[in-house]
Image (cartoon, grey):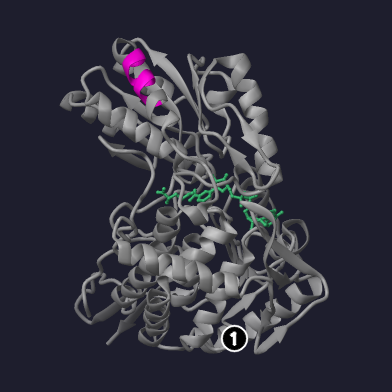
Amino acid sequence: MIPYKHEPFTDFTNEENKKAYQEALQKVEGYLGQDYPLYIGAEKVTTDDKIVSYNPADKEEVIGRVSKANRDHAEKAMQEASAAFESWKKVKPEIRADVLFKAAAIIRRRKHEFSALLTKEAGKPWNEADADTAEAIDFLEFYARQMLKLKDGVPVESRPGEYNRYDYIPLGVGIIISPWNFPFAIMAGTAVAAIVTGNTILLKPASTTPIVAAKFVEVMMEAGLPSGVLNFVPGSGAEVGDYLVDHPKTRFISFTGSRDVGLRIFNRASQLNDGQIWLKRVIAEMGGKDTIVVDKEADLELAAQSIVKSAFGFSGQKCSACSRAVIVEDVYDQVLNRAVELTKQLTVGNPTENHFMGPVIDQAAFDKIMSYVEIGKEEGRILAGGEGDSSKGYFVQPTIVADVDPKARLMQEEIFGPVVAFAKAKDFDEALEIANNTEYGLTGAVITTNRSNMEKAREDFHVGNLYFNRGCTGAIVGYQPFGGFNMSGTDSKAGGPDYLQLHMQAKTTSETF
Ligand SMILES: NC(=O)c1ccc[n+]([C@@H]2O[C@H](COP(=O)([O-])OP(=O)(O)OC[C@H]3O[C@@H](n4cnc5c(N)ncnc54)[C@H](O)[C@@H]3O)[C@@H](O)[C@H]2O)c1
Ligand SMILES: N[C@@H](CCC=O)C(=O)O
């Protein structure tokens, strides 16, 4: 077995890679507008009711149409998943892992095609789409290897005349509910973690990005996944989502998305329904309000670059995005002015032409972000951006709001768009206090050359992913396991050494002889 190594990113300054990506975009353009079915057991089901996926950079362009599951489909899929669990749980972990290895190989061969689809469906600029696809491959490669490590359990002590074992067995049927912002990596990663551990699943992708999910399901079938293990049920969160979360046969829910939907699921999953004989497990990865702290002893150019990249990469639509820059007053003006200068150089446009920033995902996101820009005008000074245009696609200019009070809405609420608030702190200790003053705790970064301040932050900056002297986005599977504290979720570290165990239950056996 080759040791795990993350999938390298593509260098698009290389002409060959550029050409390959343009060809992939053409390929994807050749199959836009197609229909995709539900997968329920061995059946591909086509419904009249469809979820239509549009290009956020060109809202007239249809990416594809996916059949839409209703409660009856969800019920049928639950029955199929329950039946398939009885055989899939007995399949050797090596064979389950092989399905993931094969799927990774298929995706790697079609890497630019998948990324180009993300450019069209999610509005991802090339490098962001490439990173999303690379992360999907990483999850497949990493979790397959993790399963092989866990397949014989972990050693426990035995006394003379006794043989004790500690093994992991699967849970049952899981509901996988994924977001649109990493429509490939998070959707695929959460699905395969559940599958490789011997569970069967119902996958409900986000309604704005169902096509990449449908393509992933095709890959899993091509890789040899038996029918019934992965049931594909795109549908309305309120209808299909609630129904499946409440279902007595649901054993666990793996959710990634917003705080409010996460809380709703957490709450509903705690209710006992007729016929239910277990406590449902919930893995919930939710929102963030992430801060970069800049010390007075710091590389200030690095600070400005890190803030701009983390705030505006993929238009700030990452749970890890920097939406707060907290800067010690001695260097506040310098970092702010440089960040403004860098921001004004960014280009915004159709991501097929590979601008730094593409659109935001849809009209609702556009309206929400622009409403925060208005709030920003009241709560601070807009020094860059502040404008949006939704005539053709949903474009928002990268926006910097200066001199914001640490308790202001802009500093507390997740905006999920290209808006970053700057706040001044009198010293490093106050900067850390401000960094910790939200209900979230997902990512953060500290830019400093002061070792003792770095160690203080290591201890006291309460986030699941803390970075020093770099931005706060871009965790790599297996290198920086990803997940947050407090209202950012259950800190179920995706891409980490203990993630798979969340999808299993440990069984102790003790034999006397
Ligand atoms: N912590 C992380 O790892 C992480 C990663 C990516 C995104 N996010 C968060 O996700 C959010 C953006 O994604 P989004 O807009 O897709 O989130 P969302 O909460 O609106 O939707 C996420 C998923 O939940 C589904 N859903 C909606 N209502 C439901 C219900 N009642 N029952 C079951 N499912 C339901 C949606 O259809 C979608 O598939 C942001 O808050 C972001 O911070 C977190
Ligand atoms: N894992 C990604 C963020 C995922 C959420 O949007 C990062 O580290 O930037």
Q: Is residue 247 above or below residue 384?
A: below
Q: Can residue 116 be seen in this view?
A: yes
Residue at 25 percent across and 72 percent down: it is: 155
Residue at 35 percent across and 85 percent down: it is: 94
Q: Is residue 463 above or below residue 167?
A: above
Q: Quadrant of residue 485?
A: top left
Q: Name the residue under label 1.
A: 84
Residue at 45 percent across and 52 percent down: it is: 354
- In this view, the residue in front, 92 or 11, is 11
Q: Which amino acid does label 1 sit on?
A: Ala
Q: Can residue 190 be seen in this view?
A: no
Whether residue 333 appears in magenta in the rendering, the answer is yes
Q: In this view, does 156 lie above or below 321?
A: below
Residue 147, position as x, y percentages in the image: 35, 74
Residue 131, position as x, y percentages in the image: 39, 58
Quarter of the image with the N terminus in it: bottom left
Q: Give the range drawn in magenta.
A: 332-339
Residue 167, position as x, y percentages in the image: 36, 75
Disc 1 is placed on an element classified as: helix
